[in-house]
Image (cartoon, rainbow, N blue to C red):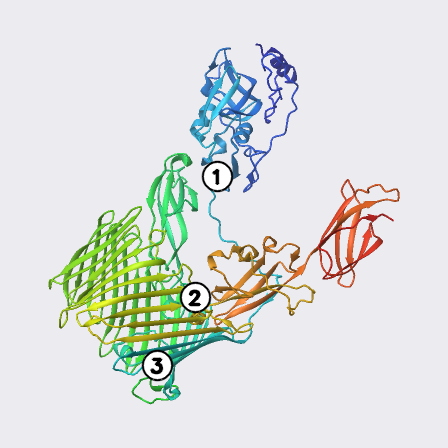
Amino acid sequence: MSLLPFAFYLLITTPVGANPPIVNPPIPRIPEGTNPLITNPPIPTPTPTQTIPTGAITPPVKPASPTTTTPAELPKDLGKASVFPVGLNLGKRNVNPSILVRGQEDGTQAINFDNWLLSYDDVIQALKLNVTSLPDGQLEVRTAGIVTRIDPKKIRTDPELGLVFSTQELQALFGVKAEFDINEYAIILEVPWLNKSSTNVAETETPIQLEGLPRIAPANFSLAAVEQKVNATGTQTRSPTYKGEFVSVGSAFGGSWFLRTNQRNFQDWQTWSVADAQFLRQTHQADYIVGSQQTFWQTQQTQQTGGYWGFTFIQRQGFVPRQVLGAGSTNSHQRLEAGSIGRTISGRAEPGTLVRLTQSIGDRVIAEVLVDSSGIYRFENIKNSNQFSGGGYRVLLYPQGRLTAQPEIRDASFSSVPGQLPPGASGLIVSGGLRHSVSDSENAGLLGKFSDFRGGIAQRWGLSENLTVGLGGIYDKSPRAMAELFYRPSKVPLQVAVSALTGDEWVWNADIRYDPTPSLSAAFISDSYSNRLNVNWRVFGGFTLFTNAVSDNGMAGGVQINLSGKNAFTFARASLDSKNYFRWNLLQRLGKMEFTQRGNEVGTLSEFSYNFSKNLFSNTGNSLVLNYETQNQNRSDKLLTVGWRYRSPQQAIDGNYLWEAQLGYGIASQGSGGVVTLSTTILPGLLLRGRYQGVTVTSDQASFSVDLVSSLGLQQGITPGDRRSEYFRTQGGLLIQPFFDRNGNGKRDAGEDAYTENVESLLVINTRSIKPLKPEVLGDRILLRLPPGTYRLDLDPAGFPPDWQATIDALAVDVVAGGYTPIVIPLFPAYTRSGVVTDAQGKAVAGARVEAIQSDKGIRHFSVTNGAGVYYLEGLHQGNYTLQINGKSVDSLKLQESSEPFQELNLQQP
């Protein structure tokens, strides 16, 4: 067990009096299983020192040393330490059979092991640390278990090993404990993050690439859908009345147009009138609204004297409006609300602490920062969506950057007031038009009656992260001034939204909310009619106390209970006000049974149901239903109904059941009679609902009602609609028609079937799956609802049927509100030819280039034969091809509709 041979080598290779160069340590490779104290080490070959370029990330396979600086001094207590080879293990796994270290051992144990020195490069490589040289000269070290910074001036230099870490420094810097095993003659490193995967920090969303893609735009004008509703009602003593509503919607000039006709008497067209007629174009920067709409201001006269027809222009700078799920009619107030507001989250922590910002639900990391000597961390422009009540974020603080340590958790949730704008942003709205009214009692004609000019102009400014103000002027029978204020302080859980309109009768709205703790919240709401104060205190779990105060109704207080279990669910809410009025609401589910009851000083309604379905808490299948209703206004009336109900498991796209039926019998204070209800959507595009009731809680007269809703789609042919035509007012979509183009002419001919299988595998929108968009397959088309904008549509070959493919991989598609953008995708047969290339002697030719050339289209397909002379040409379309081997023609190939998709074709080299 002597190191004399290796020491003698070092002695003869170092000139007397010369300082040895600072290089990475020579690493002699010693065969595994041999004792390094007996085997003479081979003469090593020195390797040059490497440096880290500024800003570069060094891969762990080739670690880089920091830029040479003034070296830190080595400890003076190294004693008789020498350089010798040892193995390096991570736990029980050997990662390097031989590295050079400086230390000392006596044959039984390590001496002064805390001061043993290991090469910088060996440590970086073994621990797989990513090292980045920062602009300030420090080194950032990152791995799955730690993120820290090291001052390169504090890394010591050994005359033979180069840059080094001591085993004590491994513990201090990286939290890695080391020990020396004399039997294995190896240093064993205990790495806390050894089996921990690296956490991915969320990246900024990559912009969608649209340049160079074929672009598809919708037509300048389209009629997307029409919808007709008819309602008939009647009683024993009153003749049936028929009312209806006709809706049509489409696109024009980059926006949507919408027409609604109110049919007060469906049988007399002279009573019909236009209730809504609107053109709407919405972009990220501006909106244009022409026709029927809501005013952006509210007065008591506005609410009492009908609608408003005119022109409205909205301009936004510095923000994008929030998307309203479900779409439908537009609201100018919502178009002046920012979809998200960037906020700054900051705090104090010890230098060297790794701070991570995560979502409150899940472990997704939004951003992270390593606290520097200032002791302050800051995350800027963190978006908070106005679509939700709060921004669910948490701050995790890892001491010394060690991700294996238990982090300190700080709440970073924040919210924004609806109407609030980002700092520096502004929104302008200008509107003018006429008052519009349609009344059953007046003969105003098809367009109704117009009177009185109204209009106004207003603007909002985001003054800071916390404050948004608005000012405006209105003319509505008289000049008025308008003011708005939206305030959300950073350090106080307070939200304030106040608006006021001057005039003979002031109109104001105030919404002030204060949430001092997650379990205590208060809201004060005031308007021209009343003042309301609501306080909620969640005492524990599902137990909440609340109190309400209304200016004209006094005070009320109560309790709310919300409990859930494996087979049970309970919700109960009860209150008592200052007038001794008791109000309650109860929902109890237990297995297949459900009981609901609500009541107040006017009456009660109770329902018990038992579902015979195998699934717990299911509303489908057969059920036994028991209802009991009371009314106590002028007299005490009661109604008891017992019946059977069926709901089919299948539902239409609009949420209505395919079949729903109820049959029962009611006994009331005024009499008795049967109850029959039937509803179906079995016919595509049609909803039929009928109800007969022989008795009610207050009357013994039988009554009936029938509703019929029919809907048609008028794009790319006439198809059944989905009874959601109003959604097209603010939404568009894609109408995709893949089909088998068997003759390859690019047009869908008779007998060429559509392909609507594997939809979620075939289509990709903006590099994401279409599954969240809930694609609807209707006959020969795939329908996707989307907000207006430009989208990238990719075709994934994984969704193609076998032996078929498309000539395009991706498209840029413009979507406008008012209808679908049609996209026709021909799928061509894909032929494959394969065989063996041989020479004149019949021997396989390797490395030959085989080409199939379609000269009329300038298309070439090629393959290079393997060692067995096999070539493989795939993706061939119909047409005439010339086959060449190494540039010389050898044969011709004709592919047509009747050709086999795959065929073997052997070729002979000329």
User: Seen in the image, is 388 located left or right of residue 285?
Assistant: left
How far apart marks 3 and 1 lie (CA) works out to 67 Å
Kindly identify the amino acid type of the residue bearing the numbered disc 2.
Answer: Gln
Drawn side of residue 329 relative to residue 180, left or right:
left
Closer to us: mark 3 or mark 2? 3
Q: Position of residue 578 (x, y in %)?
A: 11, 62
Q: Nearer the viewer, mark 3 or mark 1?
A: 3
Q: Residue at x 18, y 57 (%)?
A: 574
The residue pinned by badge 2 equals: 317
Q: Secondary structure at mark 2?
A: strand
Whichever of callouts 1 and 2 sits on the residue coming sooner in the sequence is 1
Residue 475, image quadrant? bottom left
Q: Quadrant of residue 216?
A: bottom right
Give amino acid for label 3: Tyr
Q: CA distance from mark 1 to mark 2?
A: 40 Å
SS state under label 1: loop
Image location of residue 737, percent across then percent down: 58, 65
Above or below, 884 relative to 403? below
Residue drawn at 30 percent across, 50 percent down: 591
The residue lying at 46 percent from left, 66 percent from top is 284
From the viewer's side, name the closer residue of 713 and 351: 713
Could you tell which of marks 3 and 1 lies nearer the N-terminus?
1
Residue wearing tag 1? 198
